[in-house]
Image: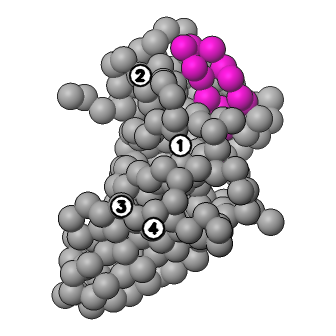
Amino acid sequence: DAGVIQSPRHEVTEMGQEVTLRCKPISGHNSLFWYRQTMMRGLELLIYFNNNVPIDDSGMPEDRFSAKMPNASFSTLKIQPSEPRDSAVYFCASSLGGSGAQPQHFGDGTRLSIL
Amino acid sequence: QKEVEQDPGPLSVPEGAIVSLNCTYSNSAFQYFMWYRQYSRKGPELLMYTYSSGNKEDGRFTAQVDKSSKYISLFIRDSQPSDSATYLCAMSAPYNTDKLIFGTGTRLQVFP
């Protein structure tokens, strides 16, 4: 069974460039989460979707960040324009809906470096 | 004050040792508690999941929840070098079960 798939695995780009991160959740999961992980701040929730609808984007740092989920099998996180302080590992996770807290299944992340 | 506090470590132990990893939290509404393990350059993977108070055992791993003290623990018996990873606690409340609040993680090193 395929897990959460993220692409690219690594991205190195110059400040000011647009960056697009992609995620394919586990088939049948109806919640999708975008996280950012840094040494200083740990794992931070940026935004999450339920049934393709954004539910909570309070963690999105600023207007330079945007996320979309056009269908149940694909989501993007876009940064435009990128800045060096955006350098981090970005994770996508998905989970089943239903009662109680459902475990989230993570992809292996995109390691982003902004020069 | 962060909602979930976790000692970042690193914690270095010899193979075979019993390891205790801990988190404290401030939100008394938390009822769902999880432990994730994260290997270097990989995503976190679920290790243990408990609801409310009590203990749960799975092989060499035991998760404990003490809601009265707002304290959770993960014990690893007979630790192995393959247990070397970062361990993150996570928890959520019934009013928003989708939103997991993570600790910052404890880095564990088990040396042969």
User: The residue tagged with tag 2: helix, strand or loop?
Assistant: loop
Q: In front of the other: label 1 or label 3?
A: 3
**Contact flag, marks 2 and 4 (Cβ < 8 Å):** no
Could you say where residue B10 lies in the image, as x and y percent from the top left?
Answer: 47, 81
Q: Position of residue B38 (x, y in %)?
A: 39, 58
Q: Secondary structure at mark 1?
A: strand
The location of residue B40, given as percent across then percent down, is: 36, 61
Q: CA distance from mark 3 to mark 2?
A: 26 Å
Closest to the observer, A76 or B52: B52
Q: Nearer the viewer, residue A51 or B95?
A: B95
- Amino acid identity at mark 1: Tyr
Up/down of A79 relative to B67, above or below = above
Picture residue at 22% right of the left edge, 86% below the top: B15
Quarter of the image where the C terminus of chain B is located: bottom left
Q: Gap between marks 1 and 4, in whole Å?
A: 30 Å
Q: Name the residue beneath numbered marker 3.
A: B56
